Amino acid sequence: MTHAPQNLVILTGAGISAESGISTFRDAGGLWEGHHIEDVASPRGFARNPELVHHFYNLRRAQLPQVAPNAAHLALDALERAWLLARRGQFLLITQNVDDLHERAGSQHLVHMHGELRKLRCTACETVLDWSGPAHPHTPCPACARPGGTLRPDIVWFGEVPYNMDLCLRALLSADIFCAIGTSGLVYPAAGFVETARENGRACRLYEINPTPTGLFDEVIAEPASGGVARFLRRLGIA
């Protein structure tokens, strides 16, 4: 006897933010906004040239007020509220994106696995601070009692462990529906999410919303996020 779906896990990637005008992670030449990835998204790059790294993320942070959540962000907020109200199950939205568009759309049950542009972390005491303006290599940590405590972007760089992995895996192990939106899902650890959901013993339904399907999922909506999420809600009987 099959059970009614109760637990829903969503994973979003760069494709959903791209529709709001935020640049995707890298272009065809392997560059990110004209920079080599290792120069602006690795601990080694930060150690070598912290001024460049801070400048790079200062520009990304300054871009945020110029963009707004799109229809897909708003639909996911509506999905969260409707799901929790009608199904009385669990809902978790996992994003690979470092912008704040999901929050501004209203999402509550949300984790940023790669960190957030509007946060900085102390290199000495590990305090995480909300931050909306520019930062520099010698910006002091206001919470740090140790000498030399300075701030870095609270972004998970290459070679670092994504945030909230235990929470994400617990949710996937109890998921009845897993949907990946605007992400290739081909890079670990996110690449392992679909297999974790597939093998969790709950006959989890696997959806992908992606103009270029990966072939990893059972049900595909081959559209950009804004239209695809609306179609996904209709399939769930919510819209």
Image: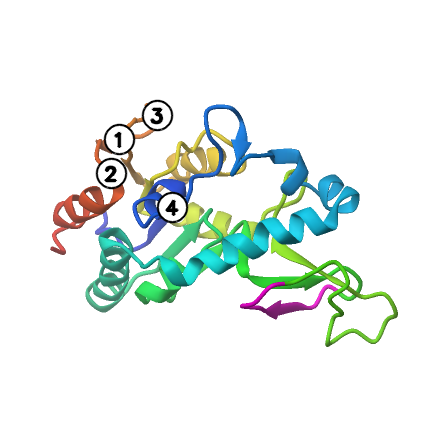
- Image coords of residue 220 (percent x, y): 23, 32
Q: CA distance from mark 1 to mark 4?
A: 14 Å
Q: CA distance from mark 1 to mark 3?
A: 9 Å
> Which of the two discs, 3 and 2, labels the residue nearer the N terminus?
3
Q: Secondary structure at mark 1?
A: loop
Seen at 83% across and 76% down, the residue is 145
Q: Amino acid at mark 4?
A: Thr
Where residue 224 is drawn, which disc sits there? 2
Q: CA distance from mark 4 to mark 3?
A: 15 Å
Question: Label 1 belongs to which residue?
Answer: 211
Q: Secondary structure at mark 3?
A: loop
Residue 142 colored magenta? no
Q: CA distance from mark 3 to mark 2?
A: 14 Å
Please give left or right for residue 34 compared with residue 90 in the image: right
Q: CA distance from mark 2 to mark 1?
A: 6 Å
* 145, above or below 51, in the image: below
- First to last magenta residue range: 126-134
- Image coords of residue 77 (percent x, y): 28, 62
- Image coords of residue 57 (percent x, y): 58, 52
- Image coords of residue 87 (percent x, y): 22, 62
Q: Secondary structure at mark 2?
A: loop
Identify the image quadrant of residue 179: top left
Question: Label 3 belongs to which residue?
Answer: 214
Q: Please tell me whether mark 1 or mark 4 is closer to you in this view.
A: 1
Of 27 and 111, the residue lying toward us:
27
> Which of the two discs, 1 and 4, labels the residue nearer the N terminus?
4
Q: How many marks?
A: 4
Question: Label 4 belongs to which residue?
Answer: 12
Q: Secondary structure at mark 4?
A: strand
